[in-house]
Amino acid sequence: MAAAPHTLVVKDLHVEVGGKEILRGVNLTLRAGEITVLMGPNGSGKSTLAYSLMGHPKYKVTKGEALLDGKDLLQLPVDQRSRAGLFLGFQYPQEVSGLSLSKFLWTAHMQRHTPEDADAEGFGRDLKTHLDYLGMDESLLKRSLNEGFSGGEKKRVEVLQMATIHPTFSILDEPDSGLDIDAVRAVGETVAKLHRPDAGILVITHYQRILRYLQADRVHVMVDGVVAMSGGRELAEELEAKGYDWVKVGVTEAPGA
Protein backbone atom coordinates (compact mmCIF):
# COMPACT_ATOMS: atom_id res chain seq x y z
CA MET A 1 0.00 0.00 0.00
CA ALA A 2 1.36 3.40 -0.97
CA ALA A 3 2.16 5.76 1.88
CA ALA A 4 -0.22 8.68 2.41
CA PRO A 5 1.11 11.96 0.98
CA HIS A 6 2.74 14.32 3.45
CA THR A 7 0.60 17.16 4.78
CA LEU A 8 1.15 20.23 6.95
CA VAL A 9 -2.17 21.37 8.41
CA VAL A 10 -2.51 24.66 10.29
CA LYS A 11 -5.74 24.92 12.29
CA ASP A 12 -7.15 28.08 13.92
CA LEU A 13 -3.68 29.44 14.68
CA HIS A 14 -3.56 32.53 16.90
CA VAL A 15 -0.22 34.23 17.57
CA GLU A 16 0.81 37.24 19.65
CA VAL A 17 3.92 39.39 19.37
CA GLY A 18 4.67 41.65 22.32
CA GLY A 19 1.16 41.17 23.64
CA LYS A 20 -0.50 42.14 20.35
CA GLU A 21 -2.44 39.52 18.41
CA ILE A 22 -1.11 39.23 14.85
CA LEU A 23 -2.60 35.94 13.65
CA ARG A 24 -6.32 35.70 14.41
CA GLY A 25 -7.21 32.17 13.39
CA VAL A 26 -5.18 31.00 10.39
CA ASN A 27 -6.30 27.85 8.59
CA LEU A 28 -3.98 26.52 5.89
CA THR A 29 -3.12 23.12 4.42
CA LEU A 30 0.07 22.31 2.52
CA ARG A 31 0.35 19.08 0.55
CA ALA A 32 3.33 17.20 -0.81
CA GLY A 33 3.71 17.67 -4.54
CA GLU A 34 2.19 21.15 -4.48
CA ILE A 35 3.57 24.68 -4.61
CA THR A 36 1.40 26.94 -2.47
CA VAL A 37 1.64 30.73 -2.59
CA LEU A 38 0.74 33.06 0.27
CA MET A 39 0.27 36.69 -0.69
CA GLY A 40 -0.85 39.76 1.20
CA PRO A 41 0.04 43.36 2.06
CA ASN A 42 2.72 44.38 4.55
CA GLY A 43 1.73 43.67 8.13
CA SER A 44 -0.85 41.05 7.25
CA GLY A 45 0.90 38.28 9.21
CA LYS A 46 2.66 36.28 6.49
CA SER A 47 6.11 36.31 8.10
CA THR A 48 4.58 35.84 11.54
CA LEU A 49 3.07 32.59 10.29
CA ALA A 50 6.44 31.43 8.96
CA TYR A 51 8.38 32.23 12.14
CA SER A 52 5.67 30.78 14.37
CA LEU A 53 5.74 27.46 12.54
CA MET A 54 9.53 27.34 12.83
CA GLY A 55 9.42 28.14 16.56
CA HIS A 56 10.89 31.64 16.93
CA PRO A 57 10.60 32.53 20.65
CA LYS A 58 9.38 36.07 19.89
CA TYR A 59 6.10 34.66 18.54
CA LYS A 60 3.69 33.32 21.18
CA VAL A 61 1.09 30.82 20.01
CA THR A 62 -2.05 31.32 22.10
CA LYS A 63 -4.39 28.94 20.29
CA GLY A 64 -4.47 26.41 17.48
CA GLU A 65 -2.21 23.70 16.14
CA ALA A 66 0.12 22.87 13.27
CA LEU A 67 0.30 19.20 12.32
CA LEU A 68 3.04 17.78 10.10
CA ASP A 69 1.85 14.30 9.17
CA GLY A 70 -0.21 14.32 12.36
CA LYS A 71 2.68 15.41 14.61
CA ASP A 72 2.10 18.71 16.43
CA LEU A 73 5.02 20.91 15.48
CA LEU A 74 4.14 23.47 18.14
CA GLN A 75 5.15 21.01 20.87
CA LEU A 76 8.64 20.51 19.41
CA PRO A 77 11.82 22.58 19.88
CA VAL A 78 13.22 24.27 16.78
CA ASP A 79 15.83 21.62 15.98
CA GLN A 80 13.24 18.84 16.10
CA ARG A 81 10.92 20.79 13.80
CA SER A 82 13.79 20.90 11.33
CA ARG A 83 14.47 17.18 11.72
CA ALA A 84 10.76 16.50 11.23
CA GLY A 85 11.12 18.00 7.76
CA LEU A 86 10.35 21.73 8.05
CA PHE A 87 12.62 24.34 6.45
CA LEU A 88 12.41 28.14 6.59
CA GLY A 89 14.15 30.37 4.06
CA PHE A 90 14.53 33.77 5.74
CA GLN A 91 13.46 37.08 4.28
CA TYR A 92 16.57 38.68 5.81
CA PRO A 93 19.30 36.00 6.06
CA GLN A 94 21.86 36.53 8.81
CA GLU A 95 25.62 36.75 8.40
CA VAL A 96 27.77 34.31 10.42
CA SER A 97 31.43 35.20 10.56
CA GLY A 98 33.92 32.33 10.71
CA LEU A 99 31.52 29.64 9.47
CA SER A 100 32.11 28.81 5.82
CA LEU A 101 29.15 28.27 3.54
CA SER A 102 30.40 24.78 2.62
CA LYS A 103 30.72 23.74 6.30
CA PHE A 104 27.29 25.15 7.07
CA LEU A 105 25.65 23.26 4.20
CA TRP A 106 27.34 19.98 5.13
CA THR A 107 26.28 20.39 8.78
CA ALA A 108 22.71 21.12 7.71
CA HIS A 109 22.77 18.09 5.41
CA MET A 110 23.91 15.86 8.27
CA GLN A 111 20.98 16.96 10.44
CA ARG A 112 18.87 14.52 8.43
CA HIS A 113 21.50 11.82 7.86
CA THR A 114 23.68 9.54 9.93
CA PRO A 115 27.39 8.98 9.32
CA GLU A 116 26.46 5.54 7.98
CA ASP A 117 24.10 6.74 5.25
CA ALA A 118 25.86 10.03 4.44
CA ASP A 119 27.20 10.24 0.89
CA ALA A 120 29.88 12.92 0.74
CA GLU A 121 30.60 12.38 -2.97
CA GLY A 122 26.92 12.55 -3.87
CA PHE A 123 26.54 15.65 -1.71
CA GLY A 124 29.38 17.30 -3.60
CA ARG A 125 27.92 16.43 -7.01
CA ASP A 126 24.48 17.70 -6.04
CA LEU A 127 25.96 20.88 -4.61
CA LYS A 128 27.78 21.60 -7.87
CA THR A 129 24.55 21.05 -9.82
CA HIS A 130 22.60 23.39 -7.55
CA LEU A 131 25.27 26.07 -7.75
CA ASP A 132 25.01 25.90 -11.54
CA TYR A 133 21.22 26.20 -11.39
CA LEU A 134 21.52 29.32 -9.26
CA GLY A 135 24.35 30.91 -11.22
CA MET A 136 26.61 30.92 -8.14
CA ASP A 137 30.39 30.70 -8.20
CA GLU A 138 32.01 27.86 -6.22
CA SER A 139 34.32 30.39 -4.55
CA LEU A 140 31.36 31.46 -2.38
CA LEU A 141 31.57 28.11 -0.57
CA LYS A 142 34.84 29.14 1.07
CA ARG A 143 33.50 32.44 2.40
CA SER A 144 31.80 32.98 5.75
CA LEU A 145 28.06 32.40 5.60
CA ASN A 146 26.42 35.41 3.93
CA GLU A 147 29.25 37.73 5.04
CA GLY A 148 29.73 40.36 2.36
CA PHE A 149 27.18 38.65 0.11
CA SER A 150 24.83 40.76 -1.98
CA GLY A 151 21.09 40.58 -1.34
CA GLY A 152 20.68 38.33 -4.37
CA GLU A 153 23.47 36.00 -3.23
CA LYS A 154 21.91 35.68 0.22
CA LYS A 155 18.56 34.69 -1.28
CA ARG A 156 20.29 32.18 -3.53
CA VAL A 157 22.01 30.71 -0.47
CA GLU A 158 18.60 30.18 1.16
CA VAL A 159 17.44 28.20 -1.87
CA LEU A 160 20.77 26.34 -1.88
CA GLN A 161 20.10 25.29 1.71
CA MET A 162 16.67 23.95 0.72
CA ALA A 163 18.28 21.98 -2.09
CA THR A 164 20.87 20.53 0.29
CA ILE A 165 18.56 19.57 3.15
CA HIS A 166 15.72 18.00 1.09
CA PRO A 167 12.99 19.05 3.56
CA THR A 168 9.46 17.71 3.46
CA PHE A 169 8.00 21.22 3.60
CA SER A 170 9.85 24.41 2.70
CA ILE A 171 8.63 27.88 3.64
CA LEU A 172 10.33 30.57 1.55
CA ASP A 173 9.69 34.00 3.06
CA GLU A 174 9.76 36.55 0.22
CA PRO A 175 12.55 34.86 -1.78
CA ASP A 176 12.10 37.54 -4.47
CA SER A 177 12.33 40.67 -2.33
CA GLY A 178 15.18 43.01 -3.21
CA LEU A 179 16.19 41.01 -6.29
CA ASP A 180 16.64 42.23 -9.84
CA ILE A 181 14.89 40.53 -12.74
CA ASP A 182 17.72 38.07 -13.46
CA ALA A 183 18.01 37.04 -9.82
CA VAL A 184 14.26 36.51 -9.51
CA ARG A 185 14.39 34.27 -12.58
CA ALA A 186 17.34 32.26 -11.19
CA VAL A 187 15.66 31.75 -7.82
CA GLY A 188 12.23 30.98 -9.31
CA GLU A 189 13.53 28.52 -11.88
CA THR A 190 15.69 26.74 -9.29
CA VAL A 191 12.80 26.37 -6.85
CA ALA A 192 10.76 24.89 -9.70
CA LYS A 193 13.56 22.42 -10.55
CA LEU A 194 13.92 21.39 -6.92
CA HIS A 195 10.20 20.78 -6.45
CA ARG A 196 9.57 17.09 -5.67
CA PRO A 197 6.38 15.02 -5.66
CA ASP A 198 7.10 13.94 -2.09
CA ALA A 199 7.58 17.48 -0.74
CA GLY A 200 5.65 20.73 -0.60
CA ILE A 201 6.70 24.37 -0.88
CA LEU A 202 5.07 27.51 0.52
CA VAL A 203 6.22 30.71 -1.20
CA ILE A 204 5.41 33.93 0.66
CA THR A 205 5.44 36.99 -1.59
CA HIS A 206 3.86 40.38 -2.29
CA TYR A 207 3.99 40.11 -6.06
CA GLN A 208 3.34 37.56 -8.75
CA ARG A 209 6.60 38.12 -10.64
CA ILE A 210 8.29 35.01 -9.19
CA LEU A 211 5.18 33.01 -10.14
CA ARG A 212 6.17 33.37 -13.79
CA TYR A 213 8.75 30.67 -13.09
CA LEU A 214 6.70 28.50 -10.71
CA GLN A 215 3.63 26.40 -11.38
CA ALA A 216 1.55 27.41 -8.37
CA ASP A 217 -1.16 24.95 -7.38
CA ARG A 218 -2.89 27.17 -4.84
CA VAL A 219 -2.84 30.87 -3.99
CA HIS A 220 -3.99 32.21 -0.63
CA VAL A 221 -4.34 35.84 0.44
CA MET A 222 -3.69 36.85 4.03
CA VAL A 223 -5.19 40.08 5.38
CA ASP A 224 -5.30 41.24 9.00
CA GLY A 225 -4.10 37.93 10.38
CA VAL A 226 -6.44 35.55 8.57
CA VAL A 227 -6.46 33.76 5.23
CA ALA A 228 -9.11 35.88 3.58
CA MET A 229 -9.29 34.37 0.10
CA SER A 230 -8.03 31.35 -1.83
CA GLY A 231 -7.87 30.37 -5.47
CA GLY A 232 -5.62 29.40 -8.34
CA ARG A 233 -2.94 31.25 -10.28
CA GLU A 234 -5.59 33.60 -11.66
CA LEU A 235 -6.06 35.04 -8.15
CA ALA A 236 -2.43 36.22 -8.10
CA GLU A 237 -2.95 37.91 -11.46
CA GLU A 238 -6.08 39.64 -10.16
CA LEU A 239 -4.20 40.90 -7.12
CA GLU A 240 -1.45 42.24 -9.35
CA ALA A 241 -4.03 44.19 -11.34
CA LYS A 242 -6.30 45.37 -8.52
CA GLY A 243 -4.15 45.47 -5.38
CA TYR A 244 -5.32 44.29 -1.96
CA ASP A 245 -7.90 46.90 -0.96
CA TRP A 246 -10.83 44.95 -2.39
CA VAL A 247 -9.80 41.91 -0.35
CA LYS A 248 -9.57 44.05 2.82
CA VAL A 249 -13.14 45.19 2.26
CA GLY A 250 -14.27 41.57 2.11
CA VAL A 251 -12.52 40.79 5.40
CA THR A 252 -14.15 43.80 7.07
CA GLU A 253 -17.55 42.68 5.90
CA ALA A 254 -17.05 39.01 6.73
CA PRO A 255 -14.40 38.42 9.44
CA GLY A 256 -12.66 35.05 9.21
CA ALA A 257 -13.80 34.48 5.63
Image: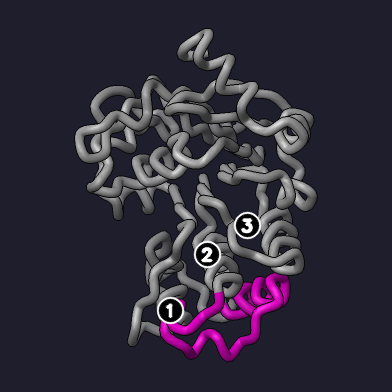
Residue 39: % across, % down:
59, 37
Q: Is residue 143 left or right of residue 185?
A: left
Residue 135: % across, % down:
71, 77
In this rendering, the label closer to the viewer, 3 or 1: 3
Asked whether residue 75 appears in the rendered view, the answer is no
Q: Amino acid at mark 2?
A: Glu
Residue occupied by mark 2: 158
Asked whether residue 245 appears in the rendered view, the answer is yes
Residue, x 41% and y 60% (percent of image)?
A: 112
Q: Amino acid at mark 3?
A: Asp
**N-terminal of the two: label 3 or label 2?**
2
Look at the numbered disc 3 and give the secondary structure of its residue. Answer: loop
Residue occupied by mark 3: 176
Residue, x 52% and y 16% (percent of image)?
A: 251
**Height in image: 50 above or below 181?**
above
**N-terminal of the two: label 3 or label 1?**
1
